[in-house]
Image: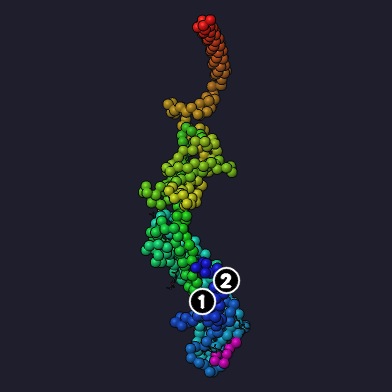
Amino acid sequence: MPGLLSNPVCLTVIWFLSWSLHPSYAQIWTDEVSDVQYGRLDSNVTLACGKSQIRTPVVWHHNHSSVFLWHQVTSNGSLSLFHVDQSAQGNYSCYDDSGLLLHSVTLRLGYPPGQLSISCQVPNHTHVRCSWRQSIKTFLPAKYNASIRGKEGEWRESRPCIVDLTNKHCDVQDPSYWQTIHRVGVTETNALGSHTDFVAIRLSKLLKPDPPQAVSVQEVEGYPTKLRVSWKNPTSWPDDTFFPLLFQVRYRPQGSHHWSEISTTYDELEISDALAGHSHQVQVRARDDVDSESQWSEWSHLSVLTPWQATYTTPDPSEDPTFFNPFSTEPVATYETRGLQGDEGNLGLVILLVLFSIFILTTVLSLIFVIWLRQKRHDHATKQELASMVKMKSIPI
Ligand SMILES: *[C@@H]1O[C@H](CO)[C@@H](O)[C@H](O)[C@H]1NC(C)=O
Ligand SMILES: *[C@@H]1O[C@H](CO)[C@@H](O)[C@H](O)[C@H]1NC(C)=O
Ligand SMILES: *[C@@H]1O[C@H](CO)[C@@H](O)[C@H](O)[C@H]1NC(C)=O
Ligand SMILES: *[C@@H]1O[C@H](CO)[C@@H](O)[C@H](O)[C@H]1NC(C)=O
Ligand SMILES: *[C@@H]1O[C@H](CO)[C@@H](O)[C@H](O)[C@H]1NC(C)=O
Ligand SMILES: *[C@@H]1O[C@H](CO)[C@@H](O)[C@H](O)[C@H]1NC(C)=O
Protein backbone atom coordinates (compact mmCIF):
# COMPACT_ATOMS: atom_id res chain seq x y z
CA MET A 1 0.00 0.00 0.00
CA PRO A 2 2.70 2.62 0.80
CA GLY A 3 4.34 1.63 -2.52
CA LEU A 4 1.05 2.12 -4.30
CA LEU A 5 0.51 5.51 -2.69
CA SER A 6 3.92 6.77 -3.71
CA ASN A 7 3.26 5.89 -7.36
CA PRO A 8 2.44 9.22 -9.12
CA VAL A 9 0.04 7.59 -11.61
CA CYS A 10 -1.95 5.99 -8.80
CA LEU A 11 -1.95 9.25 -6.87
CA THR A 12 -3.36 11.09 -9.88
CA VAL A 13 -6.09 8.47 -10.32
CA ILE A 14 -6.98 8.60 -6.61
CA TRP A 15 -7.01 12.40 -6.68
CA PHE A 16 -9.21 12.44 -9.78
CA LEU A 17 -11.63 9.89 -8.26
CA SER A 18 -11.97 11.77 -4.99
CA TRP A 19 -12.39 15.05 -6.87
CA SER A 20 -15.09 13.69 -9.19
CA LEU A 21 -16.93 11.91 -6.35
CA HIS A 22 -16.92 15.01 -4.17
CA PRO A 23 -18.23 18.01 -6.11
CA SER A 24 -18.59 20.96 -3.80
CA TYR A 25 -22.34 20.63 -3.28
CA ALA A 26 -21.88 17.02 -2.18
CA GLN A 27 -19.79 18.21 0.74
CA ILE A 28 -23.00 19.02 2.55
CA TRP A 29 -24.24 16.32 4.81
CA THR A 30 -27.74 16.65 6.16
CA ASP A 31 -28.78 15.12 9.43
CA GLU A 32 -32.51 14.94 8.78
CA VAL A 33 -33.43 13.75 12.27
CA SER A 34 -31.86 16.46 14.37
CA ASP A 35 -32.05 19.12 11.67
CA VAL A 36 -28.36 19.78 11.83
CA GLN A 37 -26.65 20.41 8.54
CA TYR A 38 -22.90 20.10 8.20
CA GLY A 39 -20.93 22.11 5.69
CA ARG A 40 -17.33 22.55 4.71
CA LEU A 41 -15.59 25.74 5.75
CA ASP A 42 -14.53 28.03 2.88
CA SER A 43 -17.02 26.40 0.50
CA ASN A 44 -20.49 27.36 -0.72
CA VAL A 45 -23.37 25.94 1.32
CA THR A 46 -27.03 25.67 0.28
CA LEU A 47 -29.76 25.39 2.91
CA ALA A 48 -33.20 24.17 1.79
CA CYS A 49 -36.36 25.64 3.29
CA GLY A 50 -37.91 22.31 4.17
CA LYS A 51 -38.05 19.14 2.11
CA SER A 52 -40.91 20.03 -0.17
CA GLN A 53 -40.77 22.52 -3.02
CA ILE A 54 -41.76 25.96 -1.78
CA ARG A 55 -43.06 28.44 -4.29
CA THR A 56 -43.95 31.41 -2.14
CA PRO A 57 -41.16 33.96 -1.53
CA VAL A 58 -39.41 33.21 1.78
CA VAL A 59 -37.39 35.21 4.30
CA TRP A 60 -34.35 33.73 6.07
CA HIS A 61 -33.08 34.59 9.54
CA HIS A 62 -29.72 33.68 11.00
CA ASN A 63 -29.45 33.51 14.80
CA HIS A 64 -32.85 35.30 14.90
CA SER A 65 -31.59 38.28 12.95
CA SER A 66 -32.14 39.03 9.29
CA VAL A 67 -28.72 40.58 8.73
CA PHE A 68 -26.15 38.42 6.97
CA LEU A 69 -23.75 38.76 4.09
CA TRP A 70 -22.77 36.81 0.99
CA HIS A 71 -25.98 34.95 0.41
CA GLN A 72 -28.61 34.39 -2.22
CA VAL A 73 -32.16 33.04 -1.99
CA THR A 74 -33.01 30.93 -5.05
CA SER A 75 -36.39 30.68 -6.74
CA ASN A 76 -37.35 27.53 -4.79
CA GLY A 77 -36.57 29.23 -1.47
CA SER A 78 -33.13 27.66 -0.84
CA LEU A 79 -30.48 29.83 0.77
CA SER A 80 -27.02 29.81 -0.76
CA LEU A 81 -24.10 30.96 1.41
CA PHE A 82 -20.80 31.71 -0.32
CA HIS A 83 -17.36 30.94 1.03
CA VAL A 84 -18.60 30.30 4.56
CA ASP A 85 -16.47 30.91 7.66
CA GLN A 86 -17.06 30.07 11.34
CA SER A 87 -19.44 32.99 11.84
CA ALA A 88 -21.88 31.46 9.33
CA GLN A 89 -22.62 28.68 11.84
CA GLY A 90 -25.78 28.86 13.92
CA ASN A 91 -29.53 28.67 13.66
CA TYR A 92 -31.16 29.36 10.28
CA SER A 93 -34.96 29.75 9.96
CA CYS A 94 -37.08 30.42 6.91
CA TYR A 95 -40.46 32.16 7.08
CA ASP A 96 -43.17 32.69 4.46
CA ASP A 97 -44.35 36.20 3.63
CA SER A 98 -47.02 36.06 6.33
CA GLY A 99 -44.26 35.50 8.94
CA LEU A 100 -45.00 31.81 9.50
CA LEU A 101 -41.98 29.66 10.43
CA LEU A 102 -41.55 27.06 7.69
CA HIS A 103 -38.31 25.38 8.65
CA SER A 104 -35.29 25.80 10.85
CA VAL A 105 -31.90 24.16 10.69
CA THR A 106 -28.63 24.43 12.59
CA LEU A 107 -25.54 24.77 10.43
CA ARG A 108 -22.21 23.40 11.65
CA LEU A 109 -19.05 23.95 9.66
CA GLY A 110 -15.70 22.18 9.56
CA TYR A 111 -13.43 20.04 7.44
CA PRO A 112 -13.47 16.37 6.47
CA PRO A 113 -10.85 14.19 8.26
CA GLY A 114 -7.29 14.61 7.04
CA GLN A 115 -4.13 12.65 7.55
CA LEU A 116 -3.58 10.99 10.93
CA SER A 117 -0.18 10.47 12.47
CA ILE A 118 -0.29 7.18 14.35
CA SER A 119 2.22 6.06 16.95
CA CYS A 120 2.24 2.99 19.16
CA GLN A 121 3.59 2.21 22.60
CA VAL A 122 4.44 -1.24 23.92
CA PRO A 123 4.76 -1.10 27.74
CA ASN A 124 5.07 -4.89 28.12
CA HIS A 125 4.94 -8.09 26.05
CA THR A 126 1.17 -8.39 26.21
CA HIS A 127 -0.04 -4.90 25.45
CA VAL A 128 0.00 -2.47 22.52
CA ARG A 129 -1.45 1.01 22.72
CA CYS A 130 -1.71 3.15 19.61
CA SER A 131 -2.60 6.82 19.62
CA TRP A 132 -3.03 9.32 16.81
CA ARG A 133 -3.06 13.00 16.08
CA GLN A 134 -5.01 14.89 13.43
CA SER A 135 -2.91 16.79 10.93
CA ILE A 136 -5.70 19.35 10.52
CA LYS A 137 -8.31 20.59 12.95
CA THR A 138 -11.71 19.56 11.62
CA PHE A 139 -13.88 21.43 14.20
CA LEU A 140 -16.37 18.56 13.99
CA PRO A 141 -17.10 15.58 16.24
CA ALA A 142 -15.45 12.42 14.94
CA LYS A 143 -15.66 8.67 15.39
CA TYR A 144 -12.70 6.32 15.15
CA ASN A 145 -12.27 2.66 14.47
CA ALA A 146 -8.93 0.93 14.45
CA SER A 147 -7.55 -2.49 13.69
CA ILE A 148 -4.29 -4.39 13.80
CA ARG A 149 -2.98 -7.35 11.87
CA GLY A 150 0.20 -9.34 11.55
CA LYS A 151 1.66 -11.04 8.52
CA GLU A 152 1.51 -14.64 9.66
CA GLY A 153 -0.80 -17.19 11.20
CA GLU A 154 -4.08 -16.26 12.77
CA TRP A 155 -2.93 -12.65 13.00
CA ARG A 156 -3.23 -12.33 9.22
CA GLU A 157 -6.88 -11.48 9.79
CA SER A 158 -7.17 -7.98 11.11
CA ARG A 159 -8.65 -7.64 14.57
CA PRO A 160 -10.04 -4.59 16.26
CA CYS A 161 -7.92 -2.32 18.35
CA ILE A 162 -10.36 -1.22 21.09
CA VAL A 163 -10.84 2.52 20.83
CA ASP A 164 -10.95 4.89 23.79
CA LEU A 165 -12.54 7.90 22.12
CA THR A 166 -11.92 10.46 24.85
CA ASN A 167 -8.20 9.75 24.96
CA LYS A 168 -7.79 9.12 21.23
CA HIS A 169 -6.03 5.81 21.59
CA CYS A 170 -6.76 2.13 21.14
CA ASP A 171 -5.55 -0.99 22.94
CA VAL A 172 -4.69 -4.51 21.83
CA GLN A 173 -4.24 -7.29 24.36
CA ASP A 174 -1.89 -10.21 23.75
CA PRO A 175 -0.58 -9.31 20.31
CA SER A 176 1.54 -11.96 18.62
CA TYR A 177 4.65 -10.43 20.12
CA TRP A 178 7.27 -12.40 18.23
CA GLN A 179 5.89 -11.56 14.79
CA THR A 180 8.19 -9.14 13.12
CA ILE A 181 5.76 -6.64 11.60
CA HIS A 182 2.23 -5.55 12.46
CA ARG A 183 0.08 -3.13 10.54
CA VAL A 184 -2.17 -0.75 12.44
CA GLY A 185 -4.96 1.15 10.70
CA VAL A 186 -7.07 3.98 12.08
CA THR A 187 -10.15 5.39 10.39
CA GLU A 188 -11.53 8.78 11.33
CA THR A 189 -15.11 9.50 10.31
CA ASN A 190 -17.02 12.74 10.67
CA ALA A 191 -20.10 14.27 9.04
CA LEU A 192 -18.06 15.37 6.03
CA GLY A 193 -16.22 12.16 5.23
CA SER A 194 -13.78 9.55 6.44
CA HIS A 195 -10.07 8.87 6.14
CA THR A 196 -7.93 5.84 6.95
CA ASP A 197 -4.21 5.77 7.66
CA PHE A 198 -1.88 2.86 8.30
CA VAL A 199 1.42 2.41 10.07
CA ALA A 200 3.73 -0.62 10.14
CA ILE A 201 5.19 -1.35 13.57
CA ARG A 202 7.76 -3.73 15.04
CA LEU A 203 6.72 -4.62 18.58
CA SER A 204 10.15 -5.73 19.78
CA LYS A 205 11.60 -2.37 18.72
CA LEU A 206 8.78 -0.43 20.36
CA LEU A 207 8.95 -2.35 23.64
CA LYS A 208 9.62 0.37 26.19
CA PRO A 209 8.77 -0.22 29.85
CA ASP A 210 7.29 2.50 32.01
CA PRO A 211 9.89 4.07 34.33
CA PRO A 212 10.74 2.19 37.55
CA GLN A 213 8.49 3.10 40.46
CA ALA A 214 8.90 3.86 44.14
CA VAL A 215 12.46 5.05 43.58
CA SER A 216 13.94 5.74 46.99
CA VAL A 217 17.33 7.18 47.90
CA GLN A 218 18.62 6.76 51.43
CA GLU A 219 21.73 7.76 53.26
CA VAL A 220 24.02 5.11 54.68
CA GLU A 221 24.67 5.95 58.29
CA GLY A 222 28.32 6.54 59.00
CA TYR A 223 29.27 6.86 55.30
CA PRO A 224 29.39 10.43 53.95
CA THR A 225 30.09 9.27 50.34
CA LYS A 226 27.46 6.54 50.08
CA LEU A 227 23.84 6.54 48.96
CA ARG A 228 21.53 3.55 48.80
CA VAL A 229 19.07 3.53 45.90
CA SER A 230 16.14 1.14 45.61
CA TRP A 231 13.12 0.92 43.28
CA LYS A 232 10.36 -1.37 42.04
CA ASN A 233 9.32 -2.70 38.65
CA PRO A 234 6.74 -0.44 36.98
CA THR A 235 3.25 -1.79 37.73
CA SER A 236 2.73 -2.38 34.01
CA TRP A 237 5.63 -4.88 33.96
CA PRO A 238 4.97 -8.47 35.14
CA ASP A 239 6.84 -9.32 38.33
CA ASP A 240 7.66 -12.88 37.29
CA THR A 241 11.19 -13.91 36.32
CA PHE A 242 10.35 -14.69 32.67
CA PHE A 243 10.76 -11.04 31.78
CA PRO A 244 13.81 -9.70 33.63
CA LEU A 245 14.52 -5.99 33.47
CA LEU A 246 17.90 -4.30 33.26
CA PHE A 247 18.14 -1.10 35.30
CA GLN A 248 20.40 1.88 34.95
CA VAL A 249 20.97 4.33 37.78
CA ARG A 250 22.47 7.73 37.11
CA TYR A 251 23.52 10.30 39.69
CA ARG A 252 25.39 13.58 39.99
CA PRO A 253 26.00 16.27 42.58
CA GLN A 254 23.43 19.02 42.11
CA GLY A 255 24.85 21.65 39.75
CA SER A 256 27.18 19.24 37.94
CA HIS A 257 26.64 18.51 34.22
CA HIS A 258 28.17 15.07 34.26
CA TRP A 259 26.15 12.00 35.22
CA SER A 260 27.72 8.82 36.57
CA GLU A 261 25.92 5.62 35.60
CA ILE A 262 25.66 2.12 37.04
CA SER A 263 23.70 -0.81 35.57
CA THR A 264 22.20 -3.71 37.48
CA THR A 265 19.51 -6.37 37.25
CA TYR A 266 18.75 -6.12 40.96
CA ASP A 267 16.24 -3.71 42.41
CA GLU A 268 18.69 -1.77 44.57
CA LEU A 269 22.31 -0.69 44.64
CA GLU A 270 24.75 1.37 46.63
CA ILE A 271 26.52 4.42 45.23
CA SER A 272 29.91 4.60 46.92
CA ASP A 273 31.55 7.62 45.28
CA ALA A 274 29.11 10.38 46.13
CA LEU A 275 30.55 13.79 46.97
CA ALA A 276 30.45 14.22 50.73
CA GLY A 277 28.28 17.08 51.90
CA HIS A 278 26.62 17.70 48.51
CA SER A 279 23.04 17.01 47.58
CA HIS A 280 22.78 14.51 44.69
CA GLN A 281 20.23 13.97 41.93
CA VAL A 282 19.39 10.33 41.29
CA GLN A 283 17.29 8.73 38.52
CA VAL A 284 16.58 5.16 37.42
CA ARG A 285 15.42 3.71 34.10
CA ALA A 286 14.65 0.21 32.85
CA ARG A 287 14.87 -1.95 29.75
CA ASP A 288 13.97 -5.51 28.80
CA ASP A 289 17.10 -7.48 29.66
CA VAL A 290 16.59 -10.07 26.89
CA ASP A 291 15.43 -8.04 23.89
CA SER A 292 18.39 -5.89 22.92
CA GLU A 293 16.35 -4.12 20.23
CA SER A 294 13.97 -2.72 22.81
CA GLN A 295 14.09 0.79 24.25
CA TRP A 296 15.04 2.26 27.59
CA SER A 297 12.17 3.62 29.64
CA GLU A 298 12.03 7.29 30.47
CA TRP A 299 14.05 8.24 33.56
CA SER A 300 12.18 8.18 36.83
CA HIS A 301 11.45 11.48 38.55
CA LEU A 302 14.50 13.19 40.08
CA SER A 303 15.21 12.09 43.63
CA VAL A 304 17.44 14.46 45.57
CA LEU A 305 19.38 13.63 48.72
CA THR A 306 22.59 14.59 50.55
CA PRO A 307 24.66 11.66 51.87
CA TRP A 308 24.91 11.13 55.59
CA GLN A 309 26.70 13.98 57.34
CA ALA A 310 28.35 13.85 60.71
CA THR A 311 27.05 17.21 61.91
CA TYR A 312 23.36 16.67 61.81
CA THR A 313 22.70 12.94 61.85
CA THR A 314 25.17 11.68 64.44
CA PRO A 315 23.62 10.93 67.78
CA ASP A 316 25.36 12.99 70.48
CA PRO A 317 28.29 10.85 71.66
CA SER A 318 27.64 11.96 75.24
CA GLU A 319 24.24 10.27 74.97
CA ASP A 320 25.59 7.16 73.30
CA PRO A 321 29.05 6.32 74.67
CA THR A 322 29.30 3.16 72.53
CA PHE A 323 28.92 5.14 69.32
CA PHE A 324 32.11 5.25 67.34
CA ASN A 325 32.56 6.29 63.75
CA PRO A 326 35.98 6.15 62.08
CA PHE A 327 35.03 8.63 59.34
CA SER A 328 33.56 11.20 61.60
CA THR A 329 35.25 14.41 62.59
CA GLU A 330 32.79 14.69 65.40
CA PRO A 331 34.98 13.54 68.31
CA VAL A 332 37.40 16.46 67.72
CA ALA A 333 34.50 18.84 67.42
CA THR A 334 32.91 17.69 70.64
CA TYR A 335 36.28 17.88 72.32
CA GLU A 336 36.41 21.56 71.50
CA THR A 337 32.86 22.38 72.33
CA ARG A 338 33.31 20.81 75.71
CA GLY A 339 35.79 23.59 76.41
CA LEU A 340 38.84 21.40 77.07
CA GLN A 341 41.16 23.86 75.34
CA GLY A 342 43.85 23.24 77.99
CA ASP A 343 44.39 19.72 76.70
CA GLU A 344 45.13 20.97 73.20
CA GLY A 345 48.86 21.45 73.97
CA ASN A 346 49.13 17.95 75.46
CA LEU A 347 47.46 16.48 72.37
CA GLY A 348 50.02 18.21 70.09
CA LEU A 349 52.85 16.83 72.21
CA VAL A 350 51.44 13.30 72.00
CA ILE A 351 51.18 13.54 68.20
CA LEU A 352 54.75 14.85 68.00
CA LEU A 353 56.00 11.99 70.17
CA VAL A 354 54.20 9.41 68.07
CA LEU A 355 55.63 10.90 64.85
CA PHE A 356 59.11 10.93 66.36
CA SER A 357 58.92 7.26 67.43
CA ILE A 358 57.69 6.31 63.95
CA PHE A 359 60.70 8.17 62.49
CA ILE A 360 63.17 6.38 64.82
CA LEU A 361 61.55 3.02 64.11
CA THR A 362 61.75 3.54 60.32
CA THR A 363 65.43 4.58 60.54
CA VAL A 364 66.35 1.56 62.65
CA LEU A 365 64.45 -0.79 60.34
CA SER A 366 66.13 0.65 57.22
CA LEU A 367 69.56 0.31 58.85
CA ILE A 368 68.88 -3.33 59.67
CA PHE A 369 67.68 -3.90 56.12
CA VAL A 370 70.82 -2.32 54.57
CA ILE A 371 73.10 -4.38 56.79
CA TRP A 372 71.21 -7.55 55.95
CA LEU A 373 71.44 -6.77 52.23
CA ARG A 374 75.19 -6.23 52.36
CA GLN A 375 75.66 -9.48 54.28
CA LYS A 376 73.64 -11.34 51.63
CA ARG A 377 75.71 -9.91 48.74
CA HIS A 378 78.90 -10.90 50.52
CA ASP A 379 77.65 -14.49 50.94
CA HIS A 380 76.68 -14.62 47.32
CA ALA A 381 80.12 -13.47 46.17
CA THR A 382 81.88 -16.13 48.28
CA LYS A 383 79.60 -18.81 46.83
CA GLN A 384 80.47 -17.67 43.29
CA GLU A 385 84.19 -17.82 44.07
CA LEU A 386 83.84 -21.34 45.38
CA ALA A 387 81.85 -22.37 42.31
CA SER A 388 84.48 -21.06 39.87
CA MET A 389 87.23 -22.81 41.82
CA VAL A 390 85.34 -26.09 41.52
CA LYS A 391 84.85 -25.49 37.77
CA MET A 392 88.56 -24.76 37.25
CA LYS A 393 89.47 -27.96 39.06
CA SER A 394 87.17 -30.04 36.87
CA ILE A 395 88.70 -28.74 33.60
CA PRO A 396 91.05 -31.44 32.32
CA ILE A 397 94.57 -30.16 31.79
C1 LIG B 1 -19.08 29.51 -4.78
O1 LIG B 1 -19.98 30.29 -5.55
C2 LIG B 1 -19.36 31.34 -6.26
C3 LIG B 1 -20.48 32.14 -6.91
O2 LIG B 1 -21.43 31.31 -7.49
C4 LIG B 1 -18.43 30.77 -7.32
O3 LIG B 1 -17.80 31.80 -8.01
C5 LIG B 1 -17.38 29.92 -6.58
O4 LIG B 1 -16.54 29.28 -7.53
C6 LIG B 1 -18.04 28.88 -5.72
N1 LIG B 1 -17.00 28.28 -4.91
C7 LIG B 1 -16.92 26.97 -4.76
C8 LIG B 1 -15.81 26.48 -3.89
O5 LIG B 1 -17.70 26.20 -5.31
C1 LIG C 1 -33.42 24.53 -5.06
O1 LIG C 1 -32.63 24.96 -6.17
C2 LIG C 1 -31.19 24.76 -5.99
C3 LIG C 1 -30.52 25.34 -7.21
O2 LIG C 1 -31.09 26.52 -7.58
C4 LIG C 1 -30.93 23.28 -5.88
O3 LIG C 1 -29.56 23.10 -5.67
C5 LIG C 1 -31.72 22.71 -4.73
O4 LIG C 1 -31.55 21.30 -4.69
C6 LIG C 1 -33.20 23.03 -4.83
N1 LIG C 1 -33.86 22.62 -3.63
C7 LIG C 1 -34.96 21.88 -3.58
C8 LIG C 1 -35.51 21.57 -2.22
O5 LIG C 1 -35.48 21.49 -4.59
C1 LIG D 1 -24.63 32.39 15.35
O1 LIG D 1 -24.62 31.49 16.48
C2 LIG D 1 -23.54 30.54 16.44
C3 LIG D 1 -23.69 29.64 17.65
O2 LIG D 1 -24.95 29.56 18.12
C4 LIG D 1 -22.21 31.27 16.47
O3 LIG D 1 -21.16 30.32 16.35
C5 LIG D 1 -22.13 32.22 15.28
O4 LIG D 1 -20.93 32.95 15.33
C6 LIG D 1 -23.34 33.17 15.31
N1 LIG D 1 -23.21 33.99 14.10
C7 LIG D 1 -23.61 35.26 14.04
C8 LIG D 1 -23.36 35.98 12.78
O5 LIG D 1 -24.14 35.77 15.00
C1 LIG E 1 -33.77 28.07 15.86
O1 LIG E 1 -34.74 29.14 15.78
C2 LIG E 1 -36.10 28.71 15.70
C3 LIG E 1 -36.96 29.91 15.51
O2 LIG E 1 -36.72 30.89 16.45
C4 LIG E 1 -36.45 27.91 16.98
O3 LIG E 1 -37.78 27.45 16.90
C5 LIG E 1 -35.48 26.74 17.10
O4 LIG E 1 -35.71 26.03 18.31
C6 LIG E 1 -34.04 27.21 17.07
N1 LIG E 1 -33.17 26.07 17.03
C7 LIG E 1 -32.05 25.96 17.77
C8 LIG E 1 -31.30 24.69 17.63
O5 LIG E 1 -31.69 26.83 18.53
C1 LIG F 1 -13.40 1.04 10.09
O1 LIG F 1 -14.69 0.61 9.76
C2 LIG F 1 -14.98 0.72 8.36
C3 LIG F 1 -16.43 0.33 8.17
O2 LIG F 1 -16.74 -0.82 8.86
C4 LIG F 1 -14.03 -0.19 7.56
O3 LIG F 1 -14.29 -0.06 6.18
C5 LIG F 1 -12.61 0.24 7.84
O4 LIG F 1 -11.72 -0.63 7.20
C6 LIG F 1 -12.36 0.21 9.35
N1 LIG F 1 -11.05 0.77 9.56
C7 LIG F 1 -10.05 0.08 10.09
C8 LIG F 1 -8.76 0.78 10.23
O5 LIG F 1 -10.16 -1.09 10.42
C1 LIG G 1 0.75 -4.40 30.37
O1 LIG G 1 0.49 -3.00 30.30
C2 LIG G 1 -0.89 -2.67 30.34
C3 LIG G 1 -1.01 -1.16 30.14
O2 LIG G 1 -0.27 -0.44 31.04
C4 LIG G 1 -1.48 -3.11 31.67
O3 LIG G 1 -2.86 -2.80 31.69
C5 LIG G 1 -1.28 -4.61 31.81
O4 LIG G 1 -1.77 -5.04 33.05
C6 LIG G 1 0.20 -4.96 31.67
N1 LIG G 1 0.36 -6.39 31.68
C7 LIG G 1 1.08 -7.02 32.60
C8 LIG G 1 1.18 -8.49 32.44
O5 LIG G 1 1.62 -6.42 33.52
Give the distance between the C-alpha atoms of the residues marked 1 and 2, in whole angstroms. Answer: 26 Å
* Residue 74 on the magenta span: yes
Among numbered discs 1 and 2, the one appearing first in the sequence: 2
**Horizontal and vertical percent for residue 340?**
54, 22
**Figure quarter occupied by ligand 6:** bottom left
| Element at label 2 | helix
| Ligand 5 within 8 angstroms of badge 2 C-beta | no
Kindly identify which residue carries mark 2: 8
310 and 397: which is toward the camera: 397
**Bounds of the magenta span?**
72-77
Question: Front-most of 13 and 291?
Answer: 13
Helix, strand or loop: magenta stretch: loop
Position in image of residue 132 (x %, y %): 50, 64
Callouts 1 and 2 close, C-beta under 8 Å: no
Q: Is residue 362 magenta?
A: no
Q: Is residue 72 left or right of residue 299?
A: right
Foreground mark, 1 or 2, reads 2
